[in-house]
């Protein structure tokens, strides 16, 4: 069974230009430190919506939500479990 974290990582990792594929993902690292720029955030939103068959509400499309992998996962978890 694939977990929420595994599914998230499969959508997230390709957008991390500064994260080696063998390096563990630090859930508290800033997206900037991982090499994720604004265009990649847009791609990430689309990838997450496709992966989880959801639509992120406008209220979650904020800098606070997309600050770290952890904050994205928290928002995602509230939608996926709902």
Image (tube, rainbow, N blue to C red):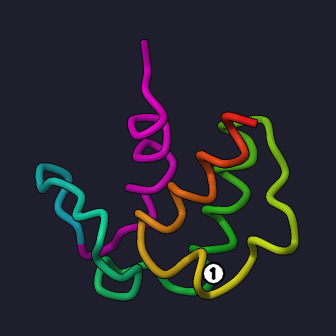
* Quadrant of the image occupied by residue 35: bottom left
Residue 59 magenta: no
* Left or right: 4 as drawn, with respect to 61: left
In x, y percent, where is residue 58?
A: 87, 72
Whether residue 10 is in magenta: the answer is yes
Image coordinates of residue 40 in percent, x first then y, are 57, 74
| Quadrant position of the C terminus in the picture | top right
The residue shown at (80%, 43%) is: 54
The quadrant in which the N terminus is found is top left
Among all residues in the image, which is located at the extreme top? 1
Q: Which residues are magenta?
A: 1-18
In the rendering, at what x and y percent does residue 53 appear?
A: 78, 35
Q: From the viewer's side, name the closer residue of 59 and 33.
A: 59
Q: Quadrant of residue 31?
A: bottom left
Instruction: Name the residue located 84 percent from the left edge and 51 percent from the top edge.
Output: 55
Q: Is residue 60 above or below residue 1?
A: below
Q: Tell me if residue 6 comes above or below residue 71 in the rendering.
A: above
Q: Residue at x 69, y 62 (%)?
A: 45
- Identify the secondary structure beneath mark 1: helix
Q: Which residue is mark 1?
A: 39
Q: Position of residue 41 (x, y in %)?
A: 60, 74
């Amino acid at each position: 069974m694939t977990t929420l974290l595994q599914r998230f990582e499969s959508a997230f990792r390709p957008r991390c230009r500064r994260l080696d594929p063998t390096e563990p993902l630090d859930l508290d690292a800033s997206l900037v430190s991982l090499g994720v720029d604004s265009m990649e955030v847009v791609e990430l939103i689309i990838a997450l919506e496709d992966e989880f068959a959801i639509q992120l509400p406008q209220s979650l499309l904020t800098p606070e939500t997309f600050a770290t992998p952890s904050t994205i996962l928290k928002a995602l978890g509230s939608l996926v479990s709902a």
